[in-house]
Amino acid sequence: MKRQLRVKKADGTTEAYLHTKVIGAINHALTSVGQGDIIFAEDMAEVVTFYLYNKPNRRTVNTHEIYSMIKAVLTATGQEEAALALTQHTFQRRLKRARTEVVSLEMNDLADAQRFGEMNPPESRQPWNKAQIVSDLTNRLSIPRQTARAIASTVEERVFRMGITKVSLGLIKQLVWSEAAVMLQAERALQTTP
């Protein structure tokens, strides 16, 4: 039996390799160019997974290598537009992460809102860091890492869709609690379904 492959994330943490995430990434790239095909995505993900598991002495892989493999498979199968869309999506995500700041200010009135817009001291701001949400959920609340990553990813997506570059810590907390409640309720429902 083969040992479970681990993925080293950009933030330095590792997690189990999930074949389904590769399927999702490929299908998302295909869908973004109007070529969504889950069967094709599953077949291409099989190629990526087979390659990664069959490299000698392989126990971990980084996200960049997975991303490169997905692009190579898409390009080799005539899906250059989807490979380009994946590159653009990745670039846009990095850009949004670099431009988004978290401001440590509770807003209770209009004066706080004005200070929020004018905050310049570096100690009151920090760069966006999805890994911090994951860490808080796993360490403080003992939420399983996979669930915490799903919550953090959903919160990140909601923040980026708002198109704001300064986000208050209070808003992040509210979004995290909202998503945590929904996901934990869904997990409980799945566990009790016969």
Image (cartoon, grey):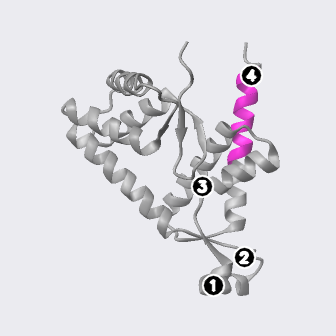
**Mark 3 closeness class: few <14, some 14–19, many ≥20 residues within 10 Å:** some
Q: Is residue 98 above or below residue 16?
A: below
- Label placed on residue 130: 3
Q: Nearer the viewer, residue 45 or 189?
A: 45
Q: Are marks 3 and 4 in contact (CB under 8 Å)?
A: no
Distance (Cα) linking label 3 and label 2: 19 Å
Work out whether mark 3 precedes mark 4 in sequence or the reverse, and give the earlier one. 3
**Mark 1 closeness class: few <14, some 14–19, many ≥20 residues within 10 Å:** some
Instruction: Point out residue 2 in the picture as x, y percentages from the top left corner.
Output: 53, 17
Distance (Cα) linking label 3 and label 4: 27 Å
Work out whether mark 2 precedes mark 1 in sequence or the reverse, and give the earlier one. 2
Residue 125 can be seen in this image: yes
Question: Pointer 4: what residue?
Answer: 191
Question: Pointer 2: what residue?
Answer: 105
Q: Are marks 3 and 2 in contact (CB under 8 Å)?
A: no
Q: Nearer the viewer, mark 3 or mark 2?
A: 3
Q: Residue at x 37, y 34 (%)?
A: 26
Q: Are marks 3 and 1 in contact (CB under 8 Å)?
A: no
Work out whether mark 3 precedes mark 1 in sequence or the reverse, and give the earlier one. 1
Q: Are marks 4 and 1 in contact (CB under 8 Å)?
A: no
Q: Residue at x 52, y 62 (%)?
A: 162
The residue positioned farthest toward the front in the image shown = 57
Distance (Cα) linking label 3 and label 1: 22 Å
Q: Are marks 2 and 1 in contact (CB under 8 Å)?
A: yes
Question: Pointer 1: what residue?
Answer: 119
User: Magenta part of the protein: which range?
Assistant: 179-191
Q: Amino acid at mark 3?
A: Lys
Q: Residue at x 68, y 80 (%)?
A: 123
- Label placed on residue 60: none
